[in-house]
């Protein structure tokens, strides 16, 4: 009896639900998405600002856009999603994005 | 809590080179998006997930490869698409200490354990979960956003409890107009809008909207919302809040960013407008529209004359069931009805099949068209809107007959 009590105590937490479904606690690790932008003028500014909130594929999968289009995207990241991008870095980031994804 | 390393620099190594180096040269898929930028790696790096199309690592956007939909109407949990807005996602969830709060315009605020919830009467439904922006990558002109192919959708048997039963337990007060849902994920930056969504009070209490603790008979994968996910049958996935932890009954319409500014569609049939068109009234995205896909033949497949070729796939009606699926082998000039598979309920994928015998050698375009129980059929011309939502044009599969 004592051995059984110890064995139960060692089991991971679990909740028995309807239909024979059991819910068990999770402790997992997600990939960190550490890849950086292709090298080029302004890549450092893009790496240092854009990748705080999202990994690089978010940008690299986008269709080509005009300079005005990229300016609008950077402005949206700052104003709506509160990306802490320094005003002085904005022109370098936009020029870099146009250089890799401009039209 | 979620932590991450950042590797800056990487002299001489591009992000693209890192992807393909990690995934292997052949482990990519070309989504054939107009204008290019269409190649994506296949990844097996995410916990509880099999091979998925990598759209974005952080916050995760993982797309289901089209061939998975050929295996059956229920999408396996390990292949079910993943979409998160913010990167602060708890990676440890304890089933004993987790609580779901219910508060706001209620008689009795609740803090429900998973044991409390699973003691309520069980409810089950099979329903399609589809991203508002599924297929955005095929928009022409292209639009910014998650550049999905057609795999930001899945179909599962959801088990849990009716939202109505939980709201009744709390006792909704007179004057309630909406119910707002929040999950455990948080904005990466302080002051940014937390991802929350709302439903009207009558919708929330319709007896179909539910809180799922299982999909396809097992607990939810973490990335699909463990331990609880809101299920809103017939509506786009933006409302299906993952890691649901907070339900607030409101006495006025919700004006938060994700309801009032984001996820808006033109209030036109099919959310369709002309590129550049302005002055259009907008409304929050809501019900899904019908779609269908051939799943056993890829574009460019070779068929043989006088040989019977099964052509099969999946269809769904959107906010109601599938009435019919029609098949065309001549680019839409003539149509014949497909036979339909088992009906798992009006919100589910439904299998269809035709036995097609090509008559003449040459190029042919195969098409399928779903008509739902409200007599809404997929359009011949693609719908367009600036956010890239609700694409449901009739799909074309070019084949060559030899």
Image (cartoon, coloured by chain):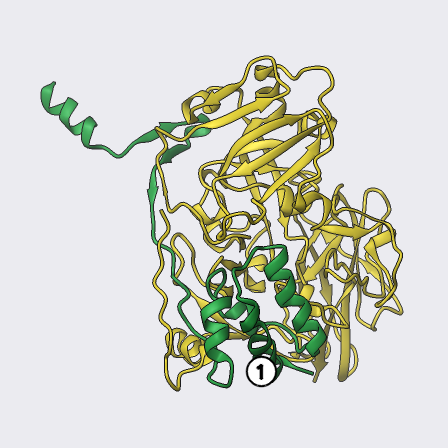
Q: Left of A22 or right of it: where is A56?
A: right
- Please name the residue shown 69% across and 83% down the image: A103
Is residue B151 shown to the viewer in this render? no
- Please name the residue shown 66% across and 46% down the image: B258
Query: Which is more toward the observer, B219 or B15?
Result: B15
Q: Chain of mark 1?
A: A
What is the secondary structure assignment of the residue under circle 1? helix
Q: Colour of chain B?
A: yellow
Chain coloured green in this rendering: A
The percent coordinates of residue B322 (x first, y second) are: 76, 46
Query: Which is more toward the observer, B173 or B329?
Result: B173
- Please name the residue shown 15% across and 23% down the image: A4
Is residue B352 shown to the viewer in this render? yes
Report crowding for label 1: few under 14, some 14 to 19, many 20 or more residues within 10 A (C-alpha): some
Quadrant holding the C terminus of chain B: bottom right
Query: Which is more toward the observer, B35 or B160?
Result: B35
The percent coordinates of residue B195 (x first, y second) are: 58, 45
Q: Left of A31 or right of it: where is A68?
A: right
């Amino acid at each position: 009896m004592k051995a059984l009590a110890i064995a139960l105590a060692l089991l991971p937490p679990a909740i028995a639900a309807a239909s024979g479904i059991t819910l068990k606690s999770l402790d997992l690790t997600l990939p960190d998405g550490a890849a950086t932008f292709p090298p080029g003028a302004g890549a450092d500014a893009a790496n240092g600002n854009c990748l705080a909130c999202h990994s690089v594929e978010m940008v690299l999968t986008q269709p080509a856009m005009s300079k005005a289009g990229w300016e609008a995207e950077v402005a949206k990241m700052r104003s709506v999603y509160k990306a802490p991008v320094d005003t002085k870095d904005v022109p370098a980031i936009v020029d870099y994005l146009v250089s890799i994804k401009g039209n | 809590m979620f932590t991450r390393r950042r590797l800056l620099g990487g002299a001489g190594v591009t992000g693209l080179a890192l992807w393909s180096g990690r995934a292997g040269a052949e482990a990519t898929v070309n989504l054939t998006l107009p204008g290019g930028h269409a190649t994506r790696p296949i990844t097996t790096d995410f916990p509880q997930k099999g091979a998925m199309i990598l759209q974005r690592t952080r916050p995760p956007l993982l797309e289901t490869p089209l061939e998975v939909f050929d295996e059956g109407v229920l999408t396996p949990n390990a292949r079910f698409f993943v979409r998160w807005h913010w990167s602060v996602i708890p990676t440890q969830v304890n089933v004993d200490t987790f609580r779901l709060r219910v508060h706001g315009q209620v008689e009795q605020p609740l803090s429900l354990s998973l044991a409390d919830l699973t003691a309520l009467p069980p409810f089950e439904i099979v329903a399609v979960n589809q991203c508002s922006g599924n297929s955005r990558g095929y928009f022409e002109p292209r639009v910014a956003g998650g550049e999905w192919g057609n795999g930001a959708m899945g179909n599962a048997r959801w088990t849990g409890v009716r939202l109505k039963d939980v709201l009744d337990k709390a006792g909704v007060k007179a004057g309630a107009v909406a119910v707002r849902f929040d999950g455990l994920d948080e904005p990466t930056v302080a002051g940014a809008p937390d991802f929350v969504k709302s439903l009207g009070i009558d919708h929330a209490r319709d007896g179909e909207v539910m809180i799922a603790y299982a999909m396809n008979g097992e607990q939810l994968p973490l990335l699909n919302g463990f331990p609880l996910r809101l299920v809103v049958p017939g509506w786009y996935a933006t409302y299906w809040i993952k890691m649901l932890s907070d339900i607030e009954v409101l006495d006025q319409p919700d004006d938060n960013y994700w309801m009032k500014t984001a996820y808006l569609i033109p209030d036109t049939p099919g959310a369709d407008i002309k590129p550049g068109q302005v002055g259009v009234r907008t409304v929050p995205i809501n019900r899904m529209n019908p779609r269908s896909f051939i799943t056993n033949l890829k574009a460019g497949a070779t068929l043989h004359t006088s040989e019977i070729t099964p052509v099969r796939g999946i269809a769904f009606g959107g906010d109601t069931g599938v009435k019919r699926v029609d098949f065309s082998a001549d680019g839409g000039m003539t149509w014949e009805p497909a036979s339909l598979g088992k009906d798992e309920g009006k919100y589910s994928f439904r299998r269809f099949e035709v036995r097609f015998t090509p008559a003449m050698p040459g190029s042919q375009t195969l098409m399928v068209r779903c008509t739902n129980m409200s007599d809404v059929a997929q359009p011949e011309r693609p719908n367009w809107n600036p956010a890239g939502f609700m694409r449901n044009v009739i799909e074309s599969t070019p084949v060559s007959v030899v």
